[in-house]
Amino acid sequence: MKRYAVIALALVMMLSTFSLASAQDQAPLTVDIFGPGQRQVNLVILPPRSLEEQMPQFAETFEKTVKNNLSYLPFIKGTQMSQLLGGDPSKGVRSTEIDFRPLQLAKIDLVMTTGWKPNGVEVRVFDTFGRRMIIGKAYGRVSKENVVSIADRFCSAFVDALTGKKAFFDSPLAFVRQLGKSKEIYTVLPQGRELTRITTMGGFNLGPAWSPDGSKLAFTHIGGKSHYLGIFDAKTGKTTLHTEKLGQSVISPEFMPGGGLAVTLNRHGHADIFQLDGNYKPRRVLAKSSFIDVSPSFDRAGRKMVFTSGRAGNPHIYMMDLQSGSVRRITLDGPYNTHPCISPDGRYIAYNRRTGSGHRIFVYDLATGRDRQVSFGPGSDEYPAFGPDGYFIAFASNRSGQYKLYLTTRHGDAAKMIQTGSGAAFAPAWDTKLQ
Amino acid sequence: MNTRLALVMAMILCFAITIGAGCSSKSGSMPPGATQVKVEDETPPEPAPEPEPMPEPDYDQEALMQQQRQEAAVQLGFMINFAFDSYELSQEARDLLSQKARLMKQYTGMTMVIEGYCDERGTEEYNLALGEKRARAAFEHLVILGVEPERLSIVSFGEERPLDPAHNEAAWAKNRRDEFKVSF
């Protein structure tokens, strides 16, 4: 018992030392992912070192995981150590043990060192030009079983130190996965881990959406004679189906920031967007026309709702001010614009536009009134979903022949596929509770 | 005396037979049409004797009705198709719906689920709404033609369950449809 207490104390001291060091060395290098043109930084990961005894076998797993995680971040460009003049410029893991000159010559902005101790690891990242530590973390009791999750935690802290946002590696995506002839809801982390099956009902389970606190998922379940509103509660692990007073169509449910749920129902002969109360019964109409109104999306403050409407003859994107009820048309070009997703801060609207060569993702900037294409096929790119930071955009594309999930940013960075297992994957929705 | 009389009568009879035989041989040698005799029978023909009553074939009336219902269900199941991004009923669709309305009115025990479908182009949830519009267009037309609405229900499958999984106009045209599922 005493021994554990000593170890725990040592760990706490170690962590505080690193935190202090981190605080003292105020990081001069940051990446403004919100700027008009983001900066790309070059990073080299030095080979792991054993600080006391033999290096554990899973040291390699840690390095691989970190490299894979960082490959999802378009603002970090990994460089091989073999490209450095003179090879490994370090003799240890601390700044005093690194020769920064060859790194500066190779225009490397960041260098990462990893030092292994019995059952523990220390990871540091230095700014090569400022010769300062950007982040230093120590993790105790590292084992084969938890090494991947520790690598994820480190990456999250690293991105936080660099950009001020750490949600990326910790925020799951819900999506629809094809299983034979049925479609089921799954969740996965954007780096492709923790693939979890949510629904097991068979049939078609479509259009998942997270509650603002990430504790529930809403979706459409298509039964033989009617649609159902499906609600998965992560706290109880149970899924319930609701149909009373909802009619035969329940389309594109979306939780509202202030409580309640918005969903398209057909109660008066046309598809309108309704707000449901806490018991999932219709409370009031949010958007109504004689045409199709569908796909609501809300900003975090609950001031704006964007949605798709066919009121102009073709589907276009509209935005409603939820306080005044005034509606403004957003898209003016193209015959088919659908599936809008507003960024949590309410500034950008990602949506799907049909072009001559397939569907593409566009981002509309409400501040400037400008559109920007952020996906480029081939095939069709659909279902854009903003991440919690309003920077990453997940979408589905059949560019490889089968629909899979991809990541890009609102700047249109090269798309990277998210691992979702076998079978097609559609309709990503990002849990945005961490911001 | 009696013997003599009998003998005389026998002789007369023999003579008569001989004469008759001679006449008969003569008539056989007469040319056709030589005789002017025309026989007209004015008596009405006797009615044909009543045939023996045959046993009725032992058909199962229930099976027959069942077969007729199934045939009706097959006809009720004929799909209708739509143009891209449209839920307007074509004349062909209206004709098929008229036939369905007639059958639904004939078989009052039947109920029907109208399923709306879209092609794979377009967004899932917009297609779910469009499929619903397509199913509702058929629903409303059948109600106008006199089918009780409580016997009909609609559900949209959007772009799910394509009839033809190919990615071309021919496949898309097949997949933009209403299907009619009958229960009885």
Image: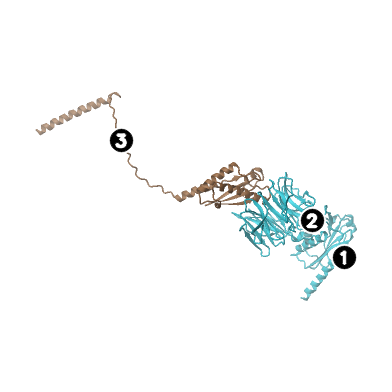
Using residue A117 as the reference point, say whether residue A253 is left or right of it. left
Q: From this view, report whether residue B13 is shown above or below residue A206.
A: above
How packed mark 3 is, by other alpha carbons closer than 10 Å (few <14, some 14-19, many 20 or more), is few
Q: Quadrant of residue A106?
A: bottom right
Q: Is residue A399 left or right of residue B165?
A: right
The Cα–Cα distance between marks 2 and 3, rounded to whole angstroms, is: 112 Å
Q: Nearer the viewer, residue B131 or A366?
A: A366
Image chain in brown? B
Farthest residue, direction right: A101
Whether residue B124 appears in this view of the structure is no
Q: Which chain letter goes with mark 2? A: A
Q: Nearer the viewer, residue B161 or A295?
A: A295
Same-chain status of marks 2 and 3: no
- B152 to A213, vertically: above or below: above
Mark 2 secondary-structure assignment: loop
User: Nearest the camera: B60 or A147?
Assistant: B60
Q: Which chain is cyan?
A: A
Amino acid type shown at disc 1: Gln
Quote the CA–CA distance across marks 2 and 1. Answer: 26 Å
Q: Secondary structure at mark 1?
A: helix
Where residue A296 appears, as percent x and y from the top left, is 70, 54
Q: Nearer the viewer, mark 2 or mark 1?
A: 1
Residue projecting furthest to the left: B1
Q: Which residue is mark 2?
A: A73
Residue A24: which numbered mark, if any?
1
Please tell me which residue is depicted at 69% across the width and 61% down the height of the picture. A216
Q: Chain of mark 3?
A: B
